[in-house]
Image (spheres, rainbow, N blue to C red):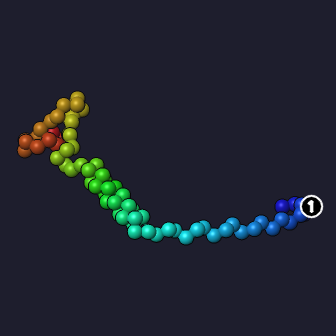
Amino acid sequence: MSFLTPKVSIPTPPPPPPPAESPEDAQRAAALSEEALMEQRKRRKGAGSTIVAGALGNETAGKTGTPTLLG
């Protein structure tokens, strides 16, 4: 600040309002979190859904009969 400008006191902002906790809000939050968990589980993929392809894009099978990167 410059010494030529007057000092201005800035008032502090008002405190945030307290969160409204009602039984409906708690049930809604629980339902939304459960839905998010279910959606996250659906997006997970296991080793069985992985497609292993060679350099040409063809699926290769090793001597064991299971697809591997080394083929």
In this rendering, would 22 be left or right of 31? right
Q: Is residue 41 visible?
A: yes
Label 1 SS: loop
Residue 23: x, y in percent? 40, 68
Q: Quadrant of residue 60?
A: top left
View extreme (top): residue? 56
Which residue is at 11% across, 40% downward? 62
Which residue is at 92% across, 61% downward? 4
- The 10 Å Cα crowd at callout 1, few under 14, some 14 to 19, many 20 or more, is few
Q: How many marks?
A: 1
Which residue is at 17% across, 47% downward? 48
Residue 42: x, y in percent? 26, 50
Which residue is at 15% across, 39% downward? 71
In this rendering, would 44 be left or right of 61? right
Q: Quadrant of residue 64?
A: top left
Residue 68: x, y in percent? 16, 43
In this rendering, would 70 be left or right of 64? right
What quarter of the picture does the N terminus occupy? bottom right
Q: Which residue is mark 1?
A: 4
Near-viewer residue (31 or 12):
31
Residue 30: x, y in percent? 35, 63
View extreme (left): residue? 64
View extreme (right): residue? 4
Indicate whether 47 appears above or below 7. Answer: above
Q: Amino acid at mark 1?
A: Leu
Near-viewer residue (64 or 23):
23
In this rendering, would 31 be left or right of 17? left
Near-viewer residue (68 or 32):
32
Q: Is residue 33 visible?
A: no
Indicate whether 34 appears above or below 62. Answer: below
